[in-house]
Amino acid sequence: MKIKAVIFDIEDTLYDSSLQMRMARLNAIRAMIEAGLPIDVETGYKRLEDIVSEYGPHYGKHFDRLLERLGLKWSPRVIAAGVVAYRETSQAYLKPFPDTVPTLINLRDHGYKLGVASDGLAVKEWQKLIQLGVHHLFHAVVISEECGTLELNIEVFKRCLRELNVEPHEAIYVSSRLNKAIRNANRAGLISVRLMRGDHCVEEPESPEAYAKYEIEKLPQIFRVIEEESVEAGDVIPRPKLNL
């Protein structure tokens, strides 16, 4: 069956979210120290990472919990300093990978439908897509909150497929995250592709369902996946002129 759609995750797929988060948290700790937080940068960063891991990235009071864990009195000045530094750094690092936009445009030019299926808060994820300058390139965007959950479950993929009007076996899903995104894409019947970027490069599958059918190191290599799937189905597709 011919591939009709390519669906993408957002984090560490369209942009380097791993670098963005590391730098944002590091600069937040530095700013909080300058505002009076009595701790060294390394310890503060480690404690903050532990809190984010415990409460999740969508929790709104990581810095409040940090002061609690350190046994310190709540300080609006220190927390505000961290929030400002975090937001400014996050914005500065919210840039698409160099090959993101060219690949998306090339896919559209070759007639493929493009989608996004990702977890998180809908407004925040849309903000990312808009600031990345890629929101207008997608035919469908489905964020898990719109399906009543913050988890990237099968229903997110099913909704995206419906909006693109394609069957699961006609769609490729690209993500760097094995045990969340890839696993549920496989469960939903999509052709899974692992993009080896970001901190998830070292992630190991926690179940047989978490193995991706393909692995690529650069986004333009998605055309090789499309070609291989088409060969399996006996289809012939035009080969794009790309430096892969």
Image (spheres, rainbow, N blue to C red):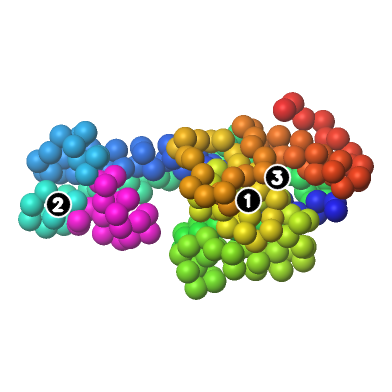
Q: Which residue is mark 1?
A: 8
* Res 69 label: 2
Residue at horizontal 57 percent and vertical 49 percent from the top: 208
Classify 10 Å Cα crowding around label 2: few (below 14), some (14-19), many (20 and above).
Answer: few
Residue at horizontal 74 percent and vertical 26 percent from the top: 243
Q: Earlier in the sequence, mark 2 or mark 1?
A: 1
Q: Is residue 46 above or below residue 70?
A: above
Q: Which residue is mark 3?
A: 104
Amino acid type at circle 2 is: Arg
Residue 138: x %, y % from top left: 68, 56
Q: Is residue 41 above or below residue 161?
A: above
* Res 106 label: none
Front position in the image: 209 or 239: 209
CA gap, disc 2 to disc 3? Answer: 44 Å
Residue 210: x %, y % from top left: 56, 49
Q: For the magenta stretch, what is the residue range?
A: 48-65
Horizontal side, residue 12 vs residue 71: left or right: right
User: Farthest residue toward the bottom?
Assistant: 148
Query: Hey, which quadrant is residue 117 in on the image?
Result: bottom right
* Main secondary structure of the magenta stretch: helix
Q: Earlier in the sequence, mark 3 or mark 1?
A: 1
Q: Earlier in the sequence, mark 2 or mark 3?
A: 2
Q: Quadrant of the C terminus?
A: top right
Is residue 57 shown in magenta?
yes
Residue at horizontal 38 percent and vertical 59 percent from the top: 58
